[in-house]
Image (cartoon, rainbow, N blue to C red):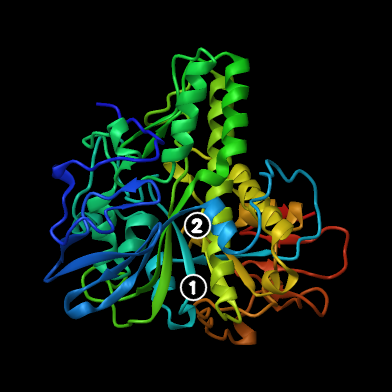
């Protein structure tokens, strides 16, 4: 059965959804949770978790002996804005020219488990690639049910969840909305976790009113974009997502111990400081459950995907604002490139989505909050995507260089090479007094020249402006 969604206001839960610890907290903020207790197993370790409602859309996760695991949030963007005392801004769909941002982004090459478990990153927020139900599945046809299965998926999302206390990952897997879950209109909400239940409900209602045969729907957390629409209907879908983006839920666990597995996945983490994880998702473009018949359909999928990226990146920044409001002097937010790789999202679209989210944040956040926001694009250390993000951010005026303070894992010092063994090129001094090394590990010259350049290997280079 395809997963369907409803946005009705009242309901009576079926007995099949009963929880071992009672029904309190099963229904909140339009969501019908499937369970509030469970068992996790990871290697030689195992344990139980329970969850209790603290306020609408927020559950406290507890381990054995009332161990505090963290707070799981499923609040919408509009609810986060209301909690901060602001109105949700209109969605910015593109930043096409260079401007002066107050909150800029620095680019960092790293590895997700190592960065999460670095003590210098205590309290940081990490935006992890997941599906729109909070879980991470290898395919829209394959459902993961146990946190231990994440060990066989070496991508950033599963590794990020394995870096932290397993109870949170198991809670998400136990409650993630899948095709196996039946949603009845009498329930008044989706069955299980989903970030887009209200958005999809609105899309379906408006689609029927407009005479469209198809609407967006979820297939095990993978968004299925309508196929074969006329140009006018595509424009209607994009307008609806733009207008209703604030109904997207930001699924996250705040204050989660970084006590999962170490980077080898063979031993337990030696640290126990706390971080926060945001579970966000891109849309597959011309792949998986979204094959594109032509260039126009692929462009439509890219636009829908970018709109959802903007909503989720913006929501993660709102969560960071809440942490600053609670007293943080500096709040690091590690943004992973959602949708890169097999989901076929373009680097330009991902970078533009980040820029749009920052512009929306600056429209509502005070300057003192923006000054405390430490935005970081976390790129995999064995890839070269960091170089392209540097180029994209620099073109928009969003790139923050490495001379500003770091909160990430310290860079390893390179061994000193004796002068008599150095090549003539290596002996040549760097140009200008302000030459420095960027977080990408590439040499950057910040002298006041018309064009700054990031120097790559051999003779390649990327112009920054």
Q: Give how far across and how far down residue 248 sits, in percent.
A: 49, 45
Residue neighbourhood size for the residue with mark 2, other residues' Cα within 10 Å, grouped as few (<14), some (14–19), many (≥20): many
Question: What residue is rendered at 48% in x and 77% in y?
Answer: 121
Q: Which residue is drawn at 37% across and 56% down?
A: 157
Mark 1, mark 2: which one is toward the viewer? 1
Sort mark 1 into few (<14), some (14-19) or many (20+) by Cα contacts within 10 Å: many
In the rendered view, does 407 fall on the left or right side of 269?
Answer: right
One can see residue 264 in this view: no
Question: How many marks do you count on the picture?
Answer: 2
Q: Residue 252: x percent and y percent?
A: 41, 60
x and y percentages locating residue 332 in the rendered image? 55, 72
Name the residue located 76 percent from the left edge and 69 percent from the top edge.
445
Image quarter of the N terminus: top left
Tell me if residue 199 comes above or below residue 73 in the rendering: above
Task: Check disc 1 and report the residue beneath it.
Answer: 124
176 versus 343 height, above or below: below
Above-or-below relation of 327 to 193: below
- Label 1 or label 2, whichever comes before in sequence order: 1
Q: Distance from label 1 to label 2 (Cα)?
A: 13 Å
Location of the C terminus (image quadrant): bottom right
Q: Which residue in the protein does label 2 denote? A: 336
Q: Looking at this view, is 250 or 387 the one in front?
A: 250
Front residue of 369/43: it is 369
Residue 180 visible in rendering: yes
């Amino acid at each position: 059965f395809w997963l369907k969604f409803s946005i009705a206001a009242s309901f009576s839960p079926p007995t099949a959804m009963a929880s071992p610890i009672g029904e309190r907290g099963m229904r909140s903020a339009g969501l019908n949770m499937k369970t509030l207790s469970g068992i996790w197993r990871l290697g030689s370790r195992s344990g139980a978790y329970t969850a209790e409602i603290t306020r609408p859309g927020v559950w406290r996760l507890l381990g054995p002996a009332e161990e505090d695991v963290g707070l799981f949030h499923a609040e919408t963007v509009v609810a986060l804005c209301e909690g901060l005392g602001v109105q949700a801004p209109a969605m910015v769909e593109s930043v096409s020219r260079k401007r002066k941002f107050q909150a800029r982004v620095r680019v960092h090459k790293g590895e997700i488990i190592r960065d999460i478990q670095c003590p210098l990153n205590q309290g940081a927020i990490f935006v992890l690639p997941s599906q729109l139900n909070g879980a991470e599945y290898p395919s829209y046809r394959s459902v993961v049910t146990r946190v231990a299965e994440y060990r066989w998926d070496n991508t950033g999302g599963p590794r990020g969840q394995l870096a932290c206390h397993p109870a949170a990952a198991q809670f998400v897997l136990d409650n993630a909305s899948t095709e196996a879950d039946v949603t009845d209109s009498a329930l008044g909400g989706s069955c299980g976790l989903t970030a887009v239940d209200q958005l999809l409900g609105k899309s379906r209602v408006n689609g029927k009113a407009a005479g469209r045969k198809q609407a967006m729907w979820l297939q095990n957390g993978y968004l299925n974009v309508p196929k074969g629409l006329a140009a006018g209907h595509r424009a209607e879908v994009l307008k609806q997502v733009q207008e209703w983006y604030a109904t997207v839920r930001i699924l996250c666990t705040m204050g989660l111990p970084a006590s999962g597995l170490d980077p080898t996945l063979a031993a337990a983490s030696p640290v126990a400081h706390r971080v926060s994880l945001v579970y966000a998702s891109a849309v597959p473009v011309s792949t998986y459950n979204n094959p594109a018949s032509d260039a126009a359909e692929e462009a439509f999928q890219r636009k829908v995907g970018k709109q959802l990226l903007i909503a989720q990146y913006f929501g993660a920044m709102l969560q960071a604002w809440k942490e600053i409001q609670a007293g943080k002097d500096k709040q690091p937010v590690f943004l992973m490139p959602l949708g890169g790789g097999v989901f076929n999202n373009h680097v330009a679209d991902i970078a533009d989505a980040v820029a749009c989210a920052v512009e929306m944040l600056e429209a509502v956040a005070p300057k003192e909050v923006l000054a405390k926001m430490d935005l970081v694009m976390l790129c995999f250390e064995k890839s070269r995507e960091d170089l392209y993000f540097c180029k994209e951010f620099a073109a928009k005026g969003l790139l923050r260089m490495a001379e500003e303070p770091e909160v990430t894992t310290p860079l390893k010092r390179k061994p000193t090479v004796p002068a008599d063994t150095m090549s003539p090129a290596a002996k040549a001094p760097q140009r200008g007094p302000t030459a420095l090394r960027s977080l990408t590990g590439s040499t950057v010259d910040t002298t006041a020249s018309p064009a700054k350049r990031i120097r790559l290997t051999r003779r390649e280079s990327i112009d920054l402006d």
